[in-house]
């Protein structure tokens, strides 16, 4: 187990604790004389401290009969010796063709043989009592052979004691003789089976499930044994505490990395004409595209908790701007599909693959949300959820698995890079192929601006049009940000050829490439490279080829980041913290497999020939994340929901101010540390999503400081509207209505029976949001209001207001099939409601007509006359 800092010792025959800071009192894998002496007192200590059966005794760390000042230090862990031992074992296992042959190899391993010797270790009787099948028993053998017998509780101690140096053999022998006598007195059962009960029985079953998943998923490394070898090899590379180790560095023997260079990018903000053309390619190619969401991360920094149950929640469930983050992803996707419908008159429903995990009940929460929302009107068959395995966290000191209690190793998701191999294992690539998809866009749930304007469409359009294997969406890197960079890698092959390709370097690895981590100077390396945002376009057959390989290349960018401490709560409810990490993969580093070969060195001339590419845009159109909870009075908004909301407001200003709408500009974050944003403007993405489309629906007017504008509708017209207060327009049928298919599932039909709203020469005056309320949580769109103008449109309802001042608190609720018109009357408002003609029920009385003119999309307003 993970080694703790507190050192219990015996002095003058009294049990005492050193006063060193404690990371873990009870769960520490012991590698010193003080360690194996702890087993003498395990049973006795158990009687005083814990009333569990003897096979789950409390483990006391580093107990020593020597005075404190003479306590011998723990010997350093010999990484190379352990790696060699495990590699030898793995080589034998690789030659086996059946499980029985593998068991024969395991049974010949001295560590396994010793552990399952019923004369020395009662766990052999536990195995009999639990009626484990051959595969389950093999998994436990792997754990023990990998040096992780401590995971199996008290039974793992004797094995650990067998590994100390010969200088202590005589003391060890005497202590173990005494320990065995004590254990015999305490747990004597006449050789009968030992059956675990209750919590421990459930824990063992859960452990076997986790081990089975690790063994199966990491088969390309050699299962559990290969996983541990990889961990130890990466740890062995570390020359200083807390260093991040990279697998690519370890295994790139066929290449020599000569240099990294700033990559060439396609700047969408500069070449506007090309950007518009690329976006149209993306719209045209929508029927060839899938969508991939890696949602398996634990998102610990968000600290998201269910207010009713106290349960920790995954990031996908964060309530952001009135809906969960996952709902926001689907909403963005449906906006692109609606744009496709408006241009081509065809229904297009994109298949969505979602990688989940069991961390924080992630898979269950996401599945439940999708079911509750009836799969967003897309049909269950258009979703494929696949669950990533959890992997053991390890101590940085010796690669030992961190254990919170017997049979319960601390496990976390193995990084989003497992998505490629997992997608292959779970048939995701075949599923996309069956849906006729050639490529896919990939985005993370916490990035709330990734679909802004043309970024995603241009990325996918270029990838499809030019048959690229991988594309990155990038932007300027924030000074000192904890984010990676995109680079052009230049490598020389052993045969003298040169390889070039775009890749990503994580911020934890900057020091290896001479890149400073702190705020960069204008001439620093950091300033030259764009930010990695984990927004990708991927060619599905190319990704499948890599994912299906039977080696480590199917797990790109393997790293072991031990810079951050591992925190957990042990079985006694005590919070522990140790230095460690887990084996992680990075999905964007699949790019390392897509290099192009050249006979000579020519990195400056490889721009258009590479199989990989980068689109570049203004940062707030590419990335702004809600990754971590902002602490009270914290002046930094970076990667918080508060900061990302301000970026959304900045985007709203850029969008609407170009429509002749007068409104205050959003200033720097520091201005809003102790206050809310200058206004709240939340626009449904289906109003565009391309800004050139949205801007044709807005013209003139003003939005005052402190105002609120929420528009949940796509068929919308704003002409010379002056807003001073709150204006909220909500529609049931934002982009269409649902019809049940042959299976009885509701499927959204784009453009059918949409709600509509026109505002022309209207002034809205009310007291709006109570900006002084302490209960306001602006990024949730959970605010207190004094007054508001609220329009609620049911079904295909329509609302029109013309040449009128609407002052004070009003709610206009329009039923399905009706039009409500408001004009100025002799004594206030003139309100008229009438039914929509039957022949116009589906199309409405007016609609926006979309046409592609050259590289642009032009809109025209079509009015329909009733018979």
Image: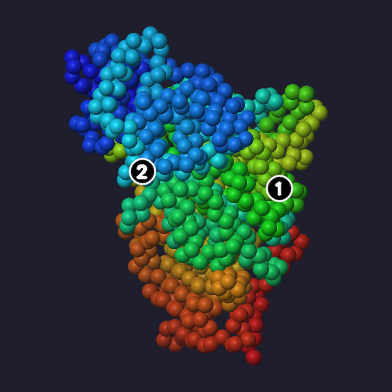
Q: Is residue 318 above or below residue 835?
A: above
Q: CA–CA distance between discs 1 and 2?
A: 44 Å
Mark 1 or mark 2: which is in front? 2
Mark 2 lies on residue: 201
Please indicate, yes or no, whether residue 5 appears anywhere in the rendered image.
Answer: yes
Q: Does residue 181 appear left or right of residue 744 in this picture?
A: left
N-terminal of the pair, mark 1 or mark 2, is 2
Question: Residue 316 location in percent, x, y?
Answer: 47, 53
* 188, 509: nearer the viewer: 188
Residue at the image position 50 percent from the left and 24 percent from the top: 109
Q: Is residue 6 left or right of residue 807?
A: left
Residue wearing tag 1: 541
Q: Is the N terminus in the top left, top right, bottom left or bottom right quadrant?
A: top left
Spot occupied by residue 835 in the image (x, y as percentages of width and height): 53, 87
Report the side of 368 relative to 848 (left or right).
left
Q: Secondary structure at mark 1?
A: helix
- Image quadrant where residue 218 sits: top right
Q: Position of residue 354 (x, y in %)?
A: 55, 53
The answer to whether residue 402 is above or below residue 707 is above
Rendered residue at 64%/80% (across/down)? 863
Picture coordinates of residue 607, whole percent (x, y): 75, 38
Q: Classify the position of the C terminus by image quarter.
A: bottom right
Q: Residue furthest bottom?
A: 867
Q: Which mark is residue 399?
A: none
Identify the coloring: rainbow
Up the image or down, 103 lies above or below 667; here it is above
In this orientation, which residue lies closer to the viewer: 796 or 454? 796
The secondary element bearing badge 2 is classed as helix
Give above or below for 567 relative to 338.
Answer: above
Tell me if mark 1 has few (under 14), some (14-19) or many (20+) residues whose alpha carbon lies within 10 angstroms of its own: some
Q: Is residue 507 visible?
A: no
């Amino acid at each position: 187990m993970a080694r703790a800092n507190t050192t219990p010792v015996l002095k003058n025959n009294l049990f005492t604790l050193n006063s060193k800071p404690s990371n873990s009192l009870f769960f520490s894998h012991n590698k010193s004389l003080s360690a194996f002496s702890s087993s003498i007192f395990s049973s006795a200590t158990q009687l005083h401290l814990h009333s569990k059966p003897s096979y789950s005794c409390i483990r006391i760390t580093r107990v020593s009969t020597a005075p404190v000042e003479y306590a011998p230090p723990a010997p350093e862990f010999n990484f190379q010796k352990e790696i060699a031992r495990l590699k030898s074992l793995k080589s034998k296992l690789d030659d086996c063709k059946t499980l029985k042959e593998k068991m024969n190899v395991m049974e010949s391993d001295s560590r396994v043989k010793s552990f399952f010797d019923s004369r020395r270790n009662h766990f052999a009787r536990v195995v009999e009592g639990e009626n484990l099948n051959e595969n389950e028993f093999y998994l436990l053998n792997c754990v023990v052979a990998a040096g992780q017998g401590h995971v199996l509780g008290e039974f793992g101690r004797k094995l650990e004691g067998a590994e100390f140096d010969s200088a202590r053999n005589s003391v060890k022998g005497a202590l173990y003789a005494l320990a065995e006598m004590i254990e015999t007195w305490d747990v004597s059962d006449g050789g009968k089976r030992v059956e675990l009960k209750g919590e421990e029985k459930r824990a063992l079953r859960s452990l076997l499930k986790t081990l089975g998943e690790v063994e199966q998923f990491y088969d390309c490394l050699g299962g559990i044994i290969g996983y541990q070898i990889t961990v130890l090899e990466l740890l062995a590379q570390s020359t200083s505490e807390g260093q991040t180790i990279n697998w690519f560095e370890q295994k790139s023997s066929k290449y020599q990395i000569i240099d990294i260079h700033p990559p060439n990018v396609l700047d969408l903000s500069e070449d506007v004409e090309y950007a518009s053309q690329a976006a149209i390619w993306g719209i045209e190619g929508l029927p060839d595209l899938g969508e991939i969401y890696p949602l398996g991360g634990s998102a610990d920094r968000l600290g998201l908790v269910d207010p009713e149950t106290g349960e920790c929640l995954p990031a996908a469930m964060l309530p952001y701007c009135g809906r969960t983050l996952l709902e926001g992803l689907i909403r963005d996707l449906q906006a692109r599909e609606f744009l496709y419908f408006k241009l081509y008159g065809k229904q297009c429903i994109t298949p969505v693959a979602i990688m989940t995990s069991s961390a924080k009940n992630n898979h269950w929460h996401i599945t439940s949300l999708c079911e509750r929302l009836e799969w967003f009107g897309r049909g269950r068959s258009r979703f494929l959820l696949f669950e990533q395995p959890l992997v053991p966290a390890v101590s940085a000191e010796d690669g030992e698995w961190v254990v919170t209690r017997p049979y319960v190793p601390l496990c976390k998701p193995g990084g989003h890079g497992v998505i490629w191999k997992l997608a292959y294992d779970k048939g995701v690539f075949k599923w996309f192929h069956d849906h006729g998809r050639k490529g896919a866009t990939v985005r993370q749930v916490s990035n709330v601006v990734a679909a802004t304007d043309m970024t995603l469409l241009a990325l996918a359009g270029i990838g499809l049009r030019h048959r690229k294997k991988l594309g990155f969406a990038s932007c300027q890197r924030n000074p000192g940000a904890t984010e990676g960079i995109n680079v052009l890698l230049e490598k020389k092959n052993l045969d003298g050829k040169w390889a070039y390709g775009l890749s990503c370097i994580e911020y934890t690895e900057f020091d290896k490439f001479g890149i400073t981590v702190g705020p960069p100077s204008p001439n620093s390396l950091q300033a030259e490279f764009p930010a990695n945002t984990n927004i990708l376009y991927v060619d599905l057959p190319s990704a499948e080829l890599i994912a299906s390989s039977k080696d480590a290349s199917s797990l790109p960018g393997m790293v072991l980041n031990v810079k951050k401490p591992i925190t957990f709560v042990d079985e006694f409810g005590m919070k522990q913290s140790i230095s460690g990490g887990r084996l992680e993969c990075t999905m964007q580093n699949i790019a390392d497999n897509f290099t192009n070969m050249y006979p000579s060195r020519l990195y400056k001339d490889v721009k258009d020939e590479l199989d990989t590419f980068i689109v570049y845009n203004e940062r707030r159109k590419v990335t702004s994340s809600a990754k971590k909870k902002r602490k009270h009075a914290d002046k930094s908004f970076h990667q918080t929901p508060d900061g990302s909301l301000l970026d959304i407001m900045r985007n709203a200003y850029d969008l609407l101010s170009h429509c002749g709408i007068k409104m205050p500009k959003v200033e720097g974050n520091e201005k809003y540390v102790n206050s809310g944003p200058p206004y709240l403007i939340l626009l449904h993405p289906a109003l565009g999503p391309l800004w050139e489309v949205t801007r044709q629906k807005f013209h003139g007017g003003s939005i005052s400081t402190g105002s609120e504008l929420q528009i949940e509708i796509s068929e919308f017209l704003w002409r010379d509207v002056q807003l001073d207060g709150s204006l909220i327009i909500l529609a049931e049928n934002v982009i269409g209505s649902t019809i049940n298919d042959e299976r009885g599932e509701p499927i959204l039909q784009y453009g059918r029976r949409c709600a509509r709203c026109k505002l022309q020469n209207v002034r809205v005056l009310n007291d709006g949001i109570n900006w002084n309320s302490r209960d306001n949580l602006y990024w949730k769109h959970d605010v207190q209001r004094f007054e508001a103008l609220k329009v609620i449109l049911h079904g295909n309802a329509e609302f029109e207001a013309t040449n009128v001042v609407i002052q004070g608190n009003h709610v206009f609720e329009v039923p399905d099939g009706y039009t409500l018109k408001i004009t100025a009357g002799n004594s206030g408002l003139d309100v008229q409601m009438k039914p929509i003609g039957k022949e116009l029920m589906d199309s409405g009385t007016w609609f926006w007509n979309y046409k592609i003119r050259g590289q642009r999309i032009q809109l025209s307003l079509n009015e329909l006359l009733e018979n």
